[in-house]
Amino acid sequence: MLVLLFVPLEYRLRAEKYEIIAYSMQFKIFHLISIVYDCKTNNSIKIRFCRRTIKEISFEEAKEQVEEKLEKTQKVVTKETQEEVEAITKNKRGQQQPKSTQATHTDESKKIQVSSSVEKLESRTQGKSEQVRRHEEKHTASKKQNKASNHSRTEINWIETIKFIWEDENRGPFIRFCKALLKDLWHAIRPKGISFNLIFGLDDPAETGMWLAKLMALYPFYAPYGNVVGDFEKATFKGDIKLFGKTNLYKFIKPLIIFVTHKEVRNYIKLLMKIGKDE
């Protein structure tokens, strides 16, 4: 298990904005195992071994499976209701004992009673189906409402926590250790290469030229990594960026362990958790 901490992990990240916003990620281990996600071609994660796809996890299929389960549940409820209607109809017909001596209007009245019972049961079936549909809509709406309320509550807690840290006079050691942690994590994930292409334009071609001239002053710094082009015909902002590098799990785990081993950090985290519960 310890060997896995030092296994080199190559990554390639790409994001672009042209007709649509798209991004892709690729992770490789010894060029044997790769994990690929591309939202532009297919909304799925592919796990490959020796360039052969051995597992594909599709988000669209997962969504379809959930919808199928809801449809099956609705069909089961409808089927049970229909069976109940048929059973009651058969009982009504079994209870009928027509006699030759009965008048015609008596038979017609019984038929009317049976048909009215069937109509009532059919209306009950439709009512149950409508109840199922309303229940699903209500469940979906309540789920969204709970998610929104939890999200707003989380935002409030975060705001209060940040406000407390900003105003606290004893935040010095905690901030110092956080800076060290972010620095170590950046060194762990720092890309070895970067390339980009940027196309921008403003409503006024003169302003586009002015900003392009200003960016040319920085050309010696960004020239090795990418290119900036001006569009003098229309207002636009599009382009792409690529990042690639190599890392391993040990580079992430080591700074995290060092961070939590400091007594000042643990005490300050406990204090922040207490503030969050009070809020």
Image (spheres, rainbow, N blue to C red):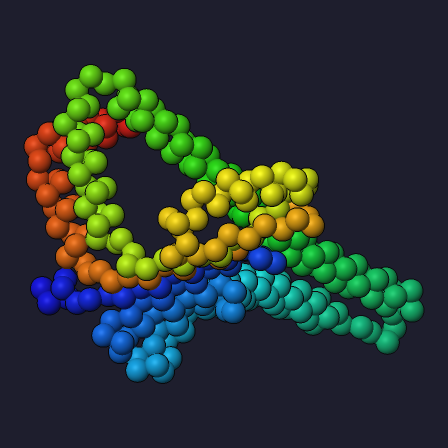
- Residue drawn 17% across and 67% down? 7
**Where 74 sits versus 165, above or below?**
below
**Where 49 sits versus 106, above or below?**
below
- Residue 134 in view: no
* Position of residue 77 in the picture relative to residue 86 (left or right): left
In the displayed orientation, state which residue is furthest to the right.
104
Judge by depth and name the residue closer to the eye, 98 or 211.
Answer: 211
Count of marks, rendered view: 0
Where does residue 117 sit, x and y in percent of width and height?
75, 59
Where does residue 19 sit, x and y in percent of width and height?
61, 58
Judge by depth and name the residue closer to the eye, 279 or 180.
Answer: 180
Judge by depth and name the residue closer to the eye, 126 or 224.
Answer: 224
Q: Quadrant of residue 123?
A: bottom right
Where does residue 149 sit, x and y in percent of width and height?
46, 34
- Residue drawn 14% across and 57% down? 250
Q: Quadrant of the N terminus?
A: bottom left
- Residue drawn 21% across and 43% down? 183
* Position of residue 129 in the picture relative to residue 212 (left or right): right
* Position of residue 117 in the picture relative to residue 17 (left or right): right
Q: Quadrant of the C terminus?
A: top left
- Residue drawn 38% across and 57% down? 224
